[in-house]
Amino acid sequence: MCRIRMTGYANFGTRLFPCLIPKALRIKAMIPSKKKIDELKELVKRDFGVEWTDQEASDAAYNLVNFYDALGRFAMEDIQKYIDTGGEPSFAGKVSDYDEWLAEQAEIVKKIQADRKEASKSKKRKG
């Protein structure tokens, strides 16, 4: 569905020479497939009556996918902060719907982290 490419904080030379970007600053960006871009073009034409060129659809799809990728990263940062602080409310001491969501997600992440640790320990025992 999507391929991964490395992008950086600056465009100068990074497309030709991604090695110019320090490894810590490299970001994995998702690139939508041609099929998904074509589906987006059809959706926009059907719902809004606008015909996009391949380049416009590609740009829009790239921006949309990476917008949601960024939201996911921000949420993961908040979840990890919630875990690290022991469940401290995110907004001035008031428990919100977001905090309830964070608590649910934190439990899922804790379980995944525990499962990974257990899997790592069992690999070490076998190896």
Image (cartoon, rainbow, N blue to C red):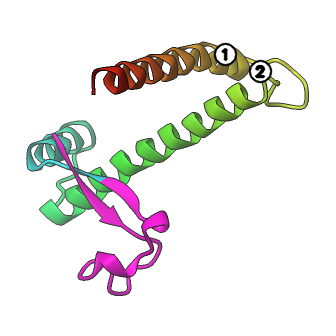
Horizontal side of residue 25 vs 55, given as left or right: right
> How much space separates mark 2 and mark 1, taking CA atoms?
7 Å
Whether residue 74 is in magenta: the answer is no
Comes first in the chain, label 2 or label 1: 2
Q: Amino acid at mark 2?
A: Gly
Q: Is residue 111 above or below residue 63?
A: above
Q: Which residue is mark 2?
A: 87
Q: Nearer the viewer, residue 58 or 101?
A: 101
Spot occupied by residue 79 in the image (x, y as percentages of width and height) = 62, 29
Q: Which residue is mark 1?
A: 103
Q: Nearer the viewer, residue 81 or 75?
A: 81
Whether residue 17 is in magenta: the answer is yes
Q: Amino acid at mark 1?
A: Ala
Q: Magenta region: which residues?
A: 1-29
Q: Is residue 43 above or below residue 60?
A: above
Q: Nearer the viewer, residue 55 or 6?
A: 6
